[in-house]
Amino acid sequence: MRSRGWSLLLLEFGLVSSIPLLAHHGNAAYDYTVTKTVKGIVTEWTWSNPHCLLKVNSKDEKGNVTHWILETNSPVDLLRTGWTATSVKPGDEVTVDVIPTKNGTPVGRIGRVVLADGTVLSTDPLAVIFIRDGAYWTKGGVGGNTGFVVGKDGVIVFDAKMTPNSAKEMIAAIAKVTPKPVTHVVLSHSDGDHVNGLSGFPKGVTIIAQENCKREMEESKDSRMAAAQDYLPTKIFDKNLDLTIDGVRVQLRHWVPAHTSGDLIMLLPDERIVFGGDLIDLTQFALVHTQKGGSTEGWITSMKGIIDLDADTFVSGHGDLQTKSALRARLTAVEARRQKIKEMIASGRSLEEIKKTAPPEEPPTGPFGSPGFTEVVYNEFAKHPS
């Protein structure tokens, strides 16, 4: 009956003829140049072969409800990326990154699901990608992108994934590249999808972070996304820290509070590679966590600092590798949008009026319904008009 129900719904949207495509990765049916964010309530979750299906009711600002039908991988593939049959259930509030169909119907393929408590369920298996000269980055699994560098006697890891199991999966993947142990973990910032996998690492690793990152991790202990308090940073710094670790030259830089108050980037000067975490996350417009002391002015300052570095490859906290030209283009867009918002505030425009002028690349809200770029800028100038 459940299978028949799905068929009837697909028939309603004129997609029965597309079922073979949807069941075999959907390359022809989906528009992979577009990602939609769907927020709503789960009405049904089907854990079965060949592909699991999720139904979500999403309500717009006028109260109109859209019934989304979303497919994802098989149960076997999802188990490898941290899902279970009970990861989502009817009644759950979810935010889903959706690759939509080309014909515009409310059917799509799941990129990831974010639960109300902040848990991120990714559909992509962990992949290790070689950059050059012993440097690699990983995508997929549960949590943000990570990186690692193989030194003479050990491995330096950048960011720790979101769950201990995903961190262990990453460590296992590193072991396929080199038998050398992980000796150091460098944290880009304190968000759970970058640090909450730390307890999956062996005890005794050196954990390096900007000093505000450690403070934010300590302050998270009573939150629903608490960092592991027995895996706090063991080495902290303020602005600059230059090290040689296992023969690898590493330069860590923090300019000012930006995405959070405790961001850092890791530059490999000899390889000309930057691991930037969410400071260079271009899947967002310019993501700022004001609740962690971030600011849009600080984001601009930090991005200028990153662009001035002698590097040509930039590993983002989410999404693909970035180039310096892409970072420059985003910086230009962010500066122009921030100035425009300032001018509209001065002319007496309301927040809701200003939000309607946002460019297509600016999401209306941040993750988990947090304020989007326009609202953050509006609040900054409301507090400090000059």
Image (cartoon, rainbow, N blue to C red):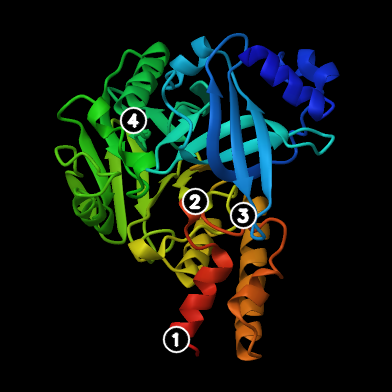
- Pointers 2 and 1 in contact (CB under 8 A)? no
Three-letter amino acid code at the position of disc 3: Leu
Left or right: residue 301 versus residue 166 is: right
| Dot label at residue 384 | 1
The residue that mark 2 highlights is: 367
Q: Are marks 3 and 2 in contact (CB under 8 Å)?
A: no
Could you give the CA–CA distance between mark 4 and mark 1, rounded to whole angstroms?
39 Å
The residues tagged by marks 2 and 4 sit, at their Cα atoms, a distance apart of 18 Å
* Percent position of residue 369, x then y: 49, 55
Give me the residue at 58% from left, 69% from top: 374
Whether residue 313 is visible: no
C-alpha gap between disc 2 and disc 1: 25 Å
Kindly tell me whether residue 99 is visible in this rendering: yes
The picture quadrant where one finds residue 333 is bottom right
| Residue marked by disc 3 | 327
Q: Earlier in the sequence, mark 3 or mark 1?
A: 3
C-beta proximity under 8 Å, tags 4 and 1: no
Element type where label 3 sits in the image: helix
Question: Of callouts 3 and 2, which one flags the residue occurring earlier in the amino acid sequence?
Answer: 3
Disc nearest the viewer among 2 and 1: 2
